[in-house]
Amino acid sequence: VKARLHISRGDRRRLSIQFTPPETLDHGPQQLLSLQQIDKALVQTTDWWQRWSSRISVEDKDLDAGLRRSVIVLKALSYLPTGAITAAPTTSLPAGVEATATWDYRYSWVRDATYTANALVKVGCHDEAFAFRRFVERSSAGSAAQMITLYGVDGSRRHEEFQLVHLKGYHGVTPVRVGNQASSQRQLDIFGELLEVSWLWHQKGYAPSDHYWEFLVDLIDHVCQHWQRPDHGIWELRGEPQNFVHSKVMCWSALNRGIGLAHGLGRKAPTARWEQARKQVHEAVEEYGYDKERGIFVQSFESNYLDASLLKIPGVGFIDYCDDRMLRTTEAIRTGLDFDGLLYRYNSQEGLPRKEGAFLPCSFWLAECLAHQHRAVQAKVTFERAAASANDLGLFSEQYDPNGEEFWGNYPQGLTHLSYITAALALRKAGIDTNFNTSQ
């Protein structure tokens, strides 16, 4: 459907797009909205968003415009009827100069959505976080064995990937895809992410119901049984599964948070078995996921590549931010994955970084890590460099090319916005002032 109109400064035009179920089309003409109804709907929508955003705060303190905009983006990516939170509202926007890197992000990833739920809780949006918890439990049928990496916003599970060969995408890039093959991957870190949400919820004074506790116990038992298996990791690489360090650490986190919840809530659980598995995971990471010569953690047990996801392992308590090993790992990532002040995701042979732009969430993870390490100047510079990649509306993409000053990847990207939020809050807590505001 195509239409063309001319509009000048000061003119006002209305566009109404209505959906009608096909089975009702033969029952007579559809009622179209009047201009007055359209204007009324706009006023109602604006009023609703202003009321909702007015309650966003951190410890009863208002957020600056940039933070508020990112929180609003996360809310806009949520689906009210089910509680699902999508990764992005777009598909097939190329993630770099390699034409085949066109993915469909119009789904609710367990990992990204748990990150989002954590960020929303920190700014007072508890209802959205709780709704997502219920969404995951329903969609997985309350069973760890039934859980997959991503769901449709309605909770659907089948998302076979196929290409629309008759279409050309952004700048003519192909293929245009529907569905995402990652739905069938093994990604062990998602269990740790879910337990992180429950742990944060517990810290806020909320206790899980008996039914939800049974679900959490099943998740942790699943980790006990499967943590030694290789997976496709946080980056969903489409090669052979590996023993990614980030995935192992998140398995450790699932066990650690589960033990903490059982003790803190006085719940019955096989904590002795969980403690044994937690010890085994920690020992495996220190033995096989650590390069003793360089004194840094590496991407996987099978390689010694750098990986920006390692910046997240102190946040779950696996290692202190200021541990010498983490300080060296942070510095190796900061220098080894640098792209004009931003970060690539990794430097492994599978998916060489020069084929894609800087991955903006990683740059915010670095700023957050540096803030916790009391490296104020570097944290400030890193944060402001990444924040400067927002457009004039304060919106972020997934990746950014500093050379061409161009967005790559799907947009607006929820993972980037929530990473911006958590980094900004970490800098604020460390007393680090920033001069950048994405609304400017």
Image: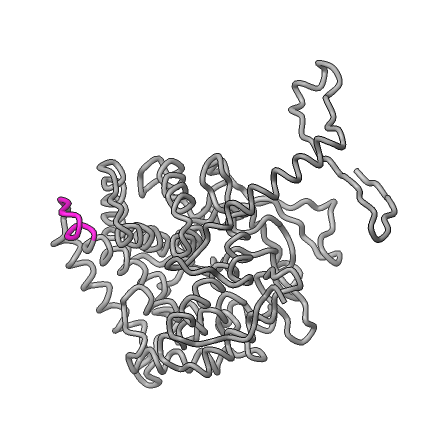
Q: Give x and y (percent) for residue 129.
A: 39, 47
- Residue 239 visible within the image: no
Q: Reply above or below: 208 against 93.
A: above
Q: Magenta span: helix, strand or loop, mainly?
A: helix
What color scheme is it?
A: one colour
On the rendered image, what quadrant is the C terminus found in? bottom right
Q: Residue at x 65, y 40 (%)?
A: 43
Q: Residue at x 13, y 47 (%)?
A: 266
On the rendered image, what quadrant is the N terminus found in? top right
Q: How many marks?
A: 0
Q: Give x and y (percent) for residue 417.
A: 52, 59
**Residue 136 placement: quadrant:** top left
Q: Residue at x 57, y 78 (%)?
A: 339
Q: Give x and y (percent) for residue 101.
A: 61, 59
Q: Reply above or below: 220 against 356.
A: above
Query: In the image as oriented, which residue stretches furthest toward the bottom?
Result: 293
User: For this view, does 99 lie left or right of residue 232?
Assistant: right
Q: Reply above or below: 40 against 299.
A: above
Q: Reply above or below: 343 against 18.
A: below
> Which residues, given as a range, are shown in magenta?
261-268
Seen from the viewer's position, the closer of residues 137 and 175 is 137
User: For this view, does 407 lie left or right of residue 57?
Assistant: right
